[in-house]
Image (spheres, helix red, strand yellow):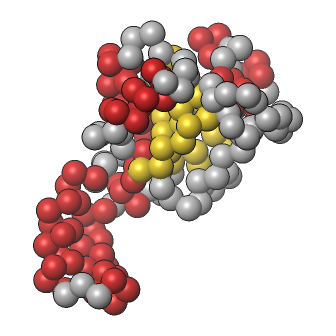
Amino acid sequence: MDRLVPIDDRGDVPSAYRDTPVERLLACHNLGAPVERVEAPELLVSVCMDHRVRLRMPEDFAYVLRTGGANLEGRAFEVSFAVAVGGVGAVAVVGHSDCGMASVADGREAFAAGLAERAGWSAGEAAAHFDEEAADHAIEDPVAFTLEQTGRLRRRYPEVLVAPLHYRVEDRRLYLVRE
């Protein structure tokens, strides 16, 4: 928790994020600010595909990319599209607690059995699929990975505001990640 900065009122938002779409996301999600529809997206949110992560934000406020672990590797075109065509000037990278991608390496047997049972794959095909892909999707520490993703985006898009956030499934709140 020492790497996470709680946002319990607007005064907790660092000056770098004040009066930005990042502050609006934090205010809406954590502080119950009104959810008012906007005319155009202001933010790109990269968030894990995990069903427990549900962000409260205005309708049409953000492009949302959901990937395992909020991993943007191989997603440069989508990010570029949101910036270039969608006009967003900010990105929120949202990792979360209890992320399955942080322990994906431990789930080979369950993965293979699940694909065999639910998708009609042979156990061998399912295990081979896991062996080929799991390492590309595994993350060790969701908070550290969020910071890595943030750094990569800042280098690639130097004029775009990029914020590292963390969603705690235990309390369903967003936190800023201390850099």
> Residue 82, percent across and down?
48, 29
Residue 125 vs 139, above or below: the answer is below
- Give the residue furthest to the front: 85
In-front residue for pair 176/55: 55
Q: What residue is shown at x 48% (from left), y 43% (from top)?
A: 65
User: Which quarter of the picture shows residue 80?
Assistant: top left
Looking at the rendered structure, the number of numbered marks drawn on it comes to 0
> Residue 167, percent across and down?
58, 45
Q: Is residue 35 left or right of residue 40?
A: right
Q: What residue is shown at x 33% (from left), y 32% (from top)?
A: 76
In-front residue for pair 172/28: 28
Q: Is residue 165 left or right of residue 36?
A: left
Q: What residue is shown at x 47% (from left), y 49% (from top)?
A: 66
Q: Determine if residue 99 is in view.
A: yes
Residue 16 vs 99, above or below: the answer is above
Where's the N terminus, which quadrant?
Answer: top right
User: Which quarter of the picture shows residue 86?
Assistant: top right
In-front residue for pair 65/150: 65
Q: Determine if residue 92 is in view.
A: no
> Residue 129, percent across and down?
18, 69
Q: What residue is shown at x 63% (from left), y 39% (from top)?
A: 174
Where's the C terminus, which quadrant?
Answer: top left
